[in-house]
Amino acid sequence: MSERCFLAIDLGAESGRVIAGLFDGQRVRLDELHRFRNGPVDVAGTRRWDVLRLWTDIQDGLAKAAEKYGDSIVSVGVDTWGVDYVLLSKHEELLGQPYNYRDPRTTGMIEYATSKVPRSEIFAATGLQFIPINSLYQLLGMQQKDPELLASADRLLMMPDFFHWLLCGSRVIEFTNATTSQCLNPVTRDWAVDMLRKLEIPTHIFPEVVSPGTKLGPLREEVARATGLPRLDVVTPATHDTACAVAAVPTSHTGRANWAYISSGTWSLIGVEVQEAILGEEALAQNVTNEGGIDGTYRLLKNVMGLWLVQECRRSFERAGRSYDYEELTRIASEAEPFKALIDPNDESFLSPADMVEAIQNWCRSHGEPVPESDGALVRCALESLALKYRQVLEGIERLTGEKVEVIHVVGGGSKNALLNQLTADACGVPVIAGPTEATALGNVLVQARAAGEIGTLADIRSVVQKSSELETFEPAEKAAWNDAWERFTALTR
């Protein structure tokens, strides 16, 4: 068959892209049409997203798609990071500049929420990891900081759903991103209304929840006119970028929890795929999360701070007049002394520090660890600590599922970091299969292709990814040294 074109709008915390996915029925290839910068904007002591500039860049990318692929384009869909949202008034006016999840207004909101509703009750109602960035704590922060704005809201849309509204006028939320909010019940798969009411969060703002692959409607006439596109279908992929990435994990073991994934980027999301949310006391004690996936699956996982640690070290080095690309950072880390210093990557001091180098060094001082001084030592500290955190998370998840993880698939931009891949294999003691780098875009495109009737099951999607990708395997080594490091790490993170 001839290639059919599906457009993926993929927005990450550092950049956004408009990508064409060309699918011939057996393999898919990607063509990046437009890349643009993204990132938080500091405004008067707050941290926001510049969604209007993102929308301008998206339209520029769509115009390039129209010029290159024209009538062969079938549909378009958006995926983004989770937890952040936009509020609309009843007249569909944008209420305020949307907040970035690292905005400090969530400080203390977990404690506030659990003072009103027991922690166990919140977990039973949502199945989500307690982490300050969640939409629930953002809403509570807004409730206290700006109650008038929240009271004016008629509709809450998660970030990808907001861009779908701009594209076609839909006012719904797709399931996978809804599950990142800590406002959705994983059993009923609808909003946790009773819990939200106890926290005095207005429930009328939460719209209908739809499944991945839902056709939302045709492109707005004015958008089609501005970009040169036909009024093609707007389709929800799995709108949470990690759900897209996990859909594109090149495994043949769909339906089993004996393989794990790490969606590696600014955040590392590490977990397994299960058929039902895992709740209960042990899951609560481990502070794991149950996020939605394709075909009603759940991603039993934990959020780990990820390559944010390295990205922010790089910014610190640049401020000091030392510029590196990521390949150079990996090289100097590989040359640094192993296990010089270890940190807990998920310590809240690393969530949004003024200077990551100082944050790492201060953490080491306060916990009796040797202080890394050189740039290579700092990056190696971050990477080795991440690998050990992955092991810690996986061992906990294995206890919950009763299945031993036999292989780890690393997907996303972080899969290009060969040093971290090898450290992960060494720390966890199982092979690591790296790739594809573009798992999120592949998942987005192939869910759209399935909505168009071009592909069948989730297993079929993964088979296409296997045929379309170059993968690299890292075998574990150096067991004794890592076991020593593991004992030290667990003592630091109790």
Image: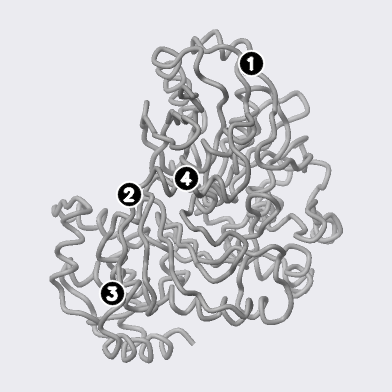
Which of discs 3 and 4 lies nearer the camera? The answer is: 4
Q: Earlier in the sequence, mark 2 or mark 3?
A: 3
Say if mark 2 contacts mark 3, CB within 8 Å: no
Q: Compared to 471, does 42 lie above or below?
A: above
Answer with mark 1 or mark 4, whichever residue precedes in sequence.
1
- Marks 1, 4: nearer the viewer: 4
Task: Give the camera-side residue of 116 and 168.
Answer: 168
Q: Which residue is mark 4?
A: 440
Q: Residues within 10 Å of mark 2 (few under 14, many from 20)?
A: few
Percent x, y of residue 481: 26, 88
Callout count: 4
Quadrant of the rendered image containing residue 373: bottom left
| Among the 4 quarters of the image, the one containing residue 263 | bottom left
* Residue type (three-letter) at the residue carrying disc 1: Arg
Q: Residue 361, labelled with which disc?
A: 3
N-term mark: 2 or 4: 4
Amino acid identity at mark 3:
Gln
Q: Earlier in the sequence, mark 1 or mark 2?
A: 1
Residue at the image point whose x is 61% and y is 24% from the top: 166
Residue shown at 32%/49% (left/top)?
470
Which of the marked residues, 3 or 4, is nearer the chain's N terminus?
A: 3
Marks 2 and 4, how far apart at CA: 15 Å
Please give the residue where the numbered disc 1 appears in the rendered image: 220
Residue farthest to the front? 1
Q: CA distance from mark 1 to mark 4?
A: 25 Å
Q: Secondary structure at mark 1?
A: loop
Which residue does the numbered mark 2 point to in the structure image? 470
- Depth order, front residue of 131/62: 62
